[in-house]
């Protein structure tokens, strides 16, 4: 399969890039096998199925069994990439993820697709806004949440190189490309993607393009905002968080996840231990999401680009008195 060209400003579904990257990896790594819970057409593992039918396992809607089988395959030297919707991987198969993957440090990669709000109207039951909290609590489970399609490719490749389990979180909807194809993904490292001196926002996943746009809009108003993308939520780059706390004294976090147990709480824990400062968390509150069109719902829950702008502007105005 010819590698897709991705340019800044393009809008591409990360799930498609994930599927294409699996095919790319399949050519290079003969030990790679993919397990799917009858959602391959949605999560795009169907691309791997078509390219490598003998290395693709259709496990049906039986996520817990799928995870257990993946653990077994890993003991034979294979590197399974398990893929299904994030809500079912983290909740329905949570016990197997903990006890058959994380506990023995099995070399199994987990793709939690349809993370957060954008579920393509699949229904409220498919919204995964607590999956990161669950995975964070599992010992030894790294969590990567790419910002855009370019980083989705790089993160999928990086996950294969990290020994042991990895939780990769991808989204369904198109996301603007913000990185160049020459971008480098460093596991465990935060990345400053927009410099500024008036305020700082730390974001992850598909909210990083929104935070970046908010910063660019505020720049036109003469306001200078630093945007730090946290592609790896666990382990968190505490040094970057501490530096932001020291420089700004007030951090805004943005995530496509509940404010309970996700990036915002990870940042709160880091600053509490390293350099206490105020943290404003933009994320979903303690509620179940509705299903529908993405942007109207992001607006309803106070999570669109304008909400990020208003929050940062308010902080800057308070700071300037």
Image (cartoon, rainbow, N blue to C red):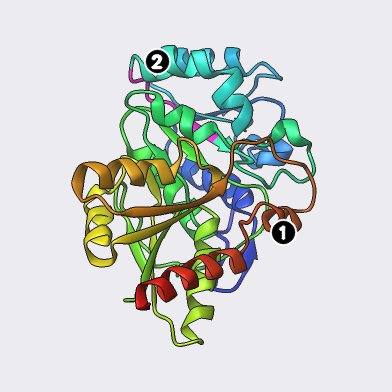
In the rendered structure, the answer to whether residue 290 lies left or right of residue 105 reads right
Residue 163 lies in what quarter of the image?
top left
Q: Residue furthest front?
A: 321
Which tag, 2 or 1, sits closer to the chain's start? Answer: 2
Vertical order, 19 against 62 (above or below): below
Q: Kindly tell me whether residue 148 is visible in this rendering.
A: no
Image marks 2 and 1: residues in contact by CB distance under 8 Å: no
- Residue 50 x, y percent position in the rendering: 67, 38
The residue carrying pointer 1 sits among few (fewer than 14), some (14 to 19) or many (20 or more) residues within 10 Å by Cα, namely: some
Looking at the image, which residue is at 21% across and 51% down?
275
Name the residue beneath numbered marker 1: 295
> Where's the C terminus, which quadrant?
bottom left
Q: Nearer the viewer, residue 269 or 17?
A: 269
- Residue 242 x, y percent position in the rendering: 23, 54
Looking at the image, which residue is at 42% across and 18% down?
101
SS label for mark 2: loop
SS label for mark 1: helix
The residue carrying pointer 2 sits among few (fewer than 14), some (14 to 19) or many (20 or more) residues within 10 Å by Cα, namely: few
Name the residue beneath numbered marker 2: 76
Residue range (magenta):
105-111
Vertical order, 72 against 228 (above or below): above
Q: Kindly tell me whether residue 146 is visible in this rendering.
A: yes
């Amino acid at each position: 399969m010819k590698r897709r060209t991705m340019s800044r400003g393009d809008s591409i579904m990360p799930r498609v890039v994930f599927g294409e990257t699996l095919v790319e990896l399949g050519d290079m790594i003969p030990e790679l096998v993919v397990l799917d819970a009858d959602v391959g057409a949605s999560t795009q593992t169907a691309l791997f199925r078509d390219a490598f039918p003998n290395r693709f396992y259709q496990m049906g809607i039986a996520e817990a069994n799928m995870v257990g089988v993946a653990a077994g395959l890993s003991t034979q030297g294979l590197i399974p990439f398990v893929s299904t919707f994030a809500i079912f991987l983290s909740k329905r198969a949570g016990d197997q993820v903990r006890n058959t993957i994380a506990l023995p440090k099995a070399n199994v990669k987990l793709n939690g697709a349809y993370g957060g709000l954008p579920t393509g109207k699949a229904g409220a039951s498919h919204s995964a806004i607590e999956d990161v909290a669950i995975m964070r609590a599992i010992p030894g489970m790294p969590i990567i949440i790419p910002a855009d399609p370019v980083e989705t490719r790089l993160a999928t490749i990086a996950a294969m190189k990290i020994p042991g389990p990895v939780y990769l979180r991808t989204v369904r909807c198109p996301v603007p490309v913000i990185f160049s194809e020459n971008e480098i993904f460093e596991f465990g490292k935060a990345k400053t993607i927009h410099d500024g001196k008036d305020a700082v926002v730390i974001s992850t996943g598909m909210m990083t393009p929104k935070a970046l746009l908010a910063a660019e809009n505020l720049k036109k108003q003469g306001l200078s905002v630093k945007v730090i993308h946290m592609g790896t939520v666990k382990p968190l780059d505490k040094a970057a968080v501490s530096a932001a706390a020291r420089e700004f004294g007030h951090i805004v976090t943005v995530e496509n996840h509940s404010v309970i147990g996700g990036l915002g709480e990870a940042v709160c824990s880091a600053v509490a231990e390293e350099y206490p400062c105020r943290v404003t968390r933009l994320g979903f509150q303690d509620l179940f999401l509705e299903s529908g069109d993405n942007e109207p719902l992001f607006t309803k829950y106070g999570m669109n680009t304008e909400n990020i702008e208003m929050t940062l502007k308010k902080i800057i105005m308070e700071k300037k008195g």
